[in-house]
Amino acid sequence: MIDLIGINKYYKNAEETLHVLKDVNLHVAKGEMIAIMGPSGSGKSTLINLLGFIDRKFEGTYLFEGESLVASSDDRLSKVRNQTVGFVFQNFSLIENNTVYENVELPLLYGGYSFSQTKEKVMAALKRVGLEGKEDKYPKQLSGGQQQRVAIARSIINNPKFIIADEPTGALDTHTSEEIMRLFEELNQQDGATIILVTHDPEVVPYCHRLIRIRDGAIIEDKELSKE
């Protein structure tokens, strides 16, 4: 599904050039669940921005399903991003003044659906993440775990080709983190979702098939994990 070949990324300022990704080669197959770990400043965020079609200023080749999208127009890239990638963030990134339903519906509206076409899909997504009956609530009325479930429902609403989860358990307690990771595991095993999970938390790693460690912009380890 995803092939990164010889990726280098530089940030330039007035005084210096920072080499933030160094000769990164990475293959992600459909249906994998991958953990990416590394210390702060290791290049994890840069890597996922690149994978999520947010950043396309890099050297090397990024092939998605065999196609390079780097030269695509901004409009096409936005459309690809909306329909292809689901994003889940540590801080949930929900719109506080919108209901749970409206938060989950938003990517559909961006994708050209009318309000009359969205209800069945939104309700199915909320049911999938265990939030039936919460559609009229606002984010502040929910626990942290429930808010992350809303974010996950929003991330799967367009049946994306892959999900990028950036520290999805970082703001949650241990018990809630386990619940969220079990939900990701279900999405991966039952729905076939491809999941790329960035984390500092070693307890998240056993849920994944593969561990990639990144340090100083380079992949220093890429290993298969045995599932119990």
Image (cartoon, grey):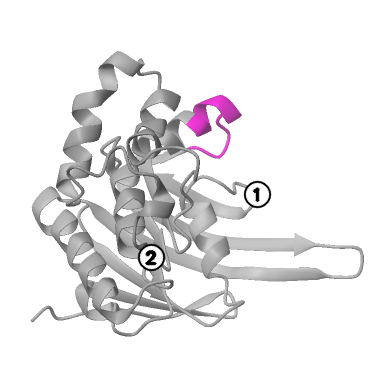
* Pointer 2 residue: 168
In this picture, residue 45 sits left or right of residue 223: right
Percent x, y of residue 157: 28, 37
Residue 86 sits above or below residue 218 on the image: above
Percent x, y of residue 16: 85, 70
Residue 179 sits above or below residue 38 on the image: above
- Is residue 73 found inside the magenta-colored segment of the image? yes
**Residue stretch in magenta:** 69-78
Tell me the distance, in whole angstroms, between the alpha carbons under discs 2 and 1. 26 Å
- Is residue 135 found inside the magenta-colored segment of the image? no
In this picture, residue 43 sits left or right of residue 118: right
> SS at mark 1?
loop
Residue most toward the right?
A: 14
Quarter of image, res 216: bottom right
The residue under the point 49% across, 45% down is 96
- Few, some or many residues within 10 Å of mark 2 (<14, 14–19, 20+): many
Q: Earlier in the sequence, mark 2 or mark 1?
A: 1
**Between 107 and 17, which is closer to the camera in this rendering?**
107
Q: Which mark is residue 170?
A: none
Amino acid at pointer 2: Pro
In this picture, residue 55 sits left or right of residue 168: right
Q: Can see residue 144?
A: yes
* Pointer 1 residue: 57
Percent x, y of residue 19: 69, 70
Point out the image quarter for the C terminus: bottom left
